[in-house]
Image (cartoon, rainbow, N blue to C red):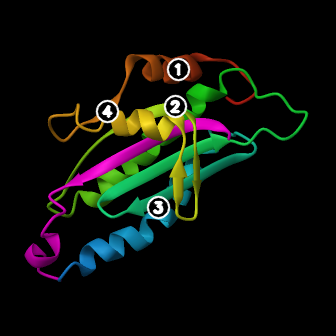
């Protein structure tokens, strides 16, 4: 199981949304269907600044939860570049920002955490240590906040200040 950055964002106000929505929830469905395309656009713009070969990105929805996974799949015999963890965290933060923008047209708020560790997001499976860490922190946020702990924030800052092959 490869390591990477991971976020779980809970949609506050989701319960009963279908009854409250003037369009019967079609507005939310449209946003959800376009989310992977929006994520791909963010990734394309990030590649001008951060180009991580072998990076896998997943944006999934599990009921009222948005799942974001960014991993670097290390090919056999290849070593991960220095500082790549911070770049993965930065990418998840950028994707969280895009999700917030997309949801801003709806009466829904987001709450969640960004973590880092081993995980797998494939088909119906969302498992791993990073998933467990994020789930453990789910109730810590007492409001519409997306938390990035000091540890992962420092990884992101280090990446932003690094002069590595991943940054121009």
Which residue is at a point 91% across and 33% down the rendered structure image?
77
Q: Which badge, 4 or 3, is on the more N-terminal residue?
A: 3
Of tags 2 and 1, the one toward the viewer is: 2
Q: Which mark is residue 137?
A: 4
The residue singled out by tag 1 in the image is: 155
Instruction: Work out how far the residue at label 1 is from the one at label 4, CA to CA, in angstroms.
Output: 19 Å
The residue at which mark 2 appears reads as 116
Residue 136 figure quarter: top left
The reply to whether dot 2 and dot 1 touch (C-beta < 8 Å) is yes
Residue at disc 3, secondary structure: helix
Q: Give coordinates of residue 120: x percent, y percent.
A: 59, 48
Looking at this view, is 116 or 54 the one in front? 116
Residue shown at the point (23%, 36%) measured from the top left: 139
Q: Give coordinates of residue 105: x percent, y percent.
A: 21, 63
Q: Nearer the viewer, mark 1 or mark 4?
A: 4
Inspect the magenta stretch and tell me whether residue 3 lies in it: yes
Which residue position is annotated with label 3? 38
Q: Is residue 90 visible?
A: no
Residue 117 x/y as whole percent: 56, 32
Q: Nearer the viewer, mark 4 or mark 3?
A: 4
CA distance separating discs 1 and 3: 25 Å
């Amino acid at each position: 199981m490869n390591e990477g950055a991971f976020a779980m964002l809970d949609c506050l106000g989701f319960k009963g949304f279908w009854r409250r929505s003037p369009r019967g929830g079609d507005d939310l469905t449209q946003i959800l269907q376009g989310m992977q395309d929006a994520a791909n656009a963010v990734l394309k713009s990030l590649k001008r600044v951060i180009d991580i070969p072998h990076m896998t990105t997943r944006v999934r929805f599990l009921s009222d939860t948005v799942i974001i996974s960014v991993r670097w799949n290390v090919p056999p015999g290849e070593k991960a570049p220095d500082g790549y963890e911070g770049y993965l965290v930065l990418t998840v933060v950028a994707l969280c920002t895009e999700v917030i923008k997309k949801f801003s047209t709806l009466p829904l708020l987001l709450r969640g955490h960004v973590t880092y560790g081993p995980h797998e997001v494939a088909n119906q499976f969302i498992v791993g240590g990073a998933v467990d860490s994020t789930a453990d922190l789910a109730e810590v946020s007492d409001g519409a906040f997306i938390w990035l702990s000091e540890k992962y924030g420092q990884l992101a800052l280090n990446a932003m200040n690094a002069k590595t092959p991943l940054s121009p």
